[in-house]
Amino acid sequence: MIIAFDSWVFRSRHHNSGIYNYAKNILLEFGALVSATDDLTIRSFFTKGYSDEVLDLAASPGIETLNTRLLRFHRLWQLGGVTAAAARARADLIFSPTSHTCPFGPFPVITTIHDVTPVVSPSFRGAQNLLERLRLWSAAKFSVKCLTDSECSKKDLVEAYGVPPHKVAVVYLGYDRETFNSAQADVVRQKALFDRHKIRSPYIFHHGAVQPRKNLERLIRACQLLWERRRDFDFQLVLAGPLGWQYEAVLEAATKAGGKVILTGAVGDEDLALLIKGAGLCVIPSLYEGFCIPLVEAMACGTPTIASNSSCLPEVSGGVLRYFDPFSIEDMASTVRMVLEDRSLQENLATNGVKRASVFSWERCARETLSALLSTGWQFEWQSERSRI
């Protein structure tokens, strides 16, 4: 069997995105899993200057690469170019790690739909949101099977697009265990990092792109409440991550905080782990998530973590954290205060967080993904779907 791996997501502009991180790790793990299998080949695509890293990621006996200039034509690739490339690869199946490629054509396609943010918690309005929703509808409608990141996302996908539940498989994501763990931090590097960003202990921490769905404006306002009510709460709020979109309100709220809110911008994973380990508390106030790797990374580092009670966050964290209403600044502030004042609770959150994070890995994610790709049910579903079109 030959599986064509859709390489659209390896475009350079996606290198700091979650979907790139997912696709990269899946392909790496596929190489380890498929190398000993004689009757299965993964064929991925690359072209110079677009997806050169595929050559390094695919350095495995079970992974082959094909050069195609079609990748340079983004819309053409999404609307049929990948089908032409799959035909050249003599593929039996196309696996797309993102819903941005439309699953049209003679080949069965299995697509990972990470979440239904444009439907449940849209960041944009008008034509842009309509286009995102159309892509999701297309992937949900025409893929022979959909993979998604959590039971919550599966429920949202079924309700939003009427996808039969048996057509959706839940595969939890992984994280970088070598970088994000509970090992002691390098205090020399950590101090240099703090000095560079003017961070001092104690501080509360969040990492992720600055965008509306992350709910960072309310987090700043919750901290502001605590600073106003308790003079002994002399902590900083450190927000690490690139500026995404519609971030102006967050920047304005941070400015009004009088230097108590630090925005580091994007940082590398090793520095990110140092920042997590140095924090007294990590807060995940998101309005909506499909999985939330930052949540797992925070727990894995042994830092006390709290999260909103929305979407998949209680599911992914296994119910072992403390949760708050993400729309209530008062509830968020109260939960932060509760943890900061209770050393025993901090230790409990840290211990249980590390234990829960150990459940997730990219190896497990890839193994379960490969199992879904190799299941024979898609053949009959595809034939039935084709007969109705």
Image (cartoon, helix red, strand yellow):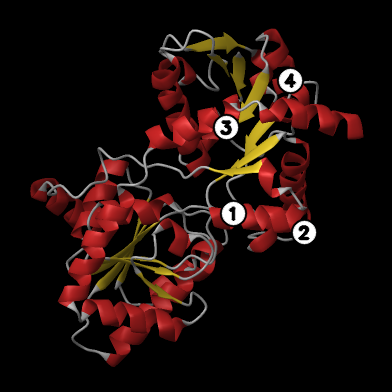
| Mark 2: few/some/many CA within 10 Å (<14, 14-19, 20+) | few
Discs 4, 1 touching: Cβ within 8 Å: no
Q: Is residue 287 above or below residue 178?
A: below
Residue at mark 2 to residue at mark 4: CA–CA distance: 30 Å
Say the numbered circle drawn on residue 238.
none
Q: Is residue 359 above or below residue 20?
A: below
Of tags 1 and 2, the one toward the viewer is 1
Q: Which residue is mark 2?
A: 126
- Asked if one can make out residue 57 in the rendered structure from this viewpoint, the answer is no
Give the mark nearest the N terminus, 2 or 3: 2
235 sits to left or right of 261? left
Q: Which residue is mark 1?
A: 153
At 41% from the left edge and 12% from the top edge, which residue is drawn?
A: 36
| Mark 3: few/some/many CA within 10 Å (<14, 14-19, 20+) | many
Label 2 is placed on what type of residue? Gly
Please provide percent x and percent y for residue 296: 36, 52
Residue at the extreme left of the image, as rendered? 188
Q: Nearer the viewer, residue 58 or 319?
A: 319
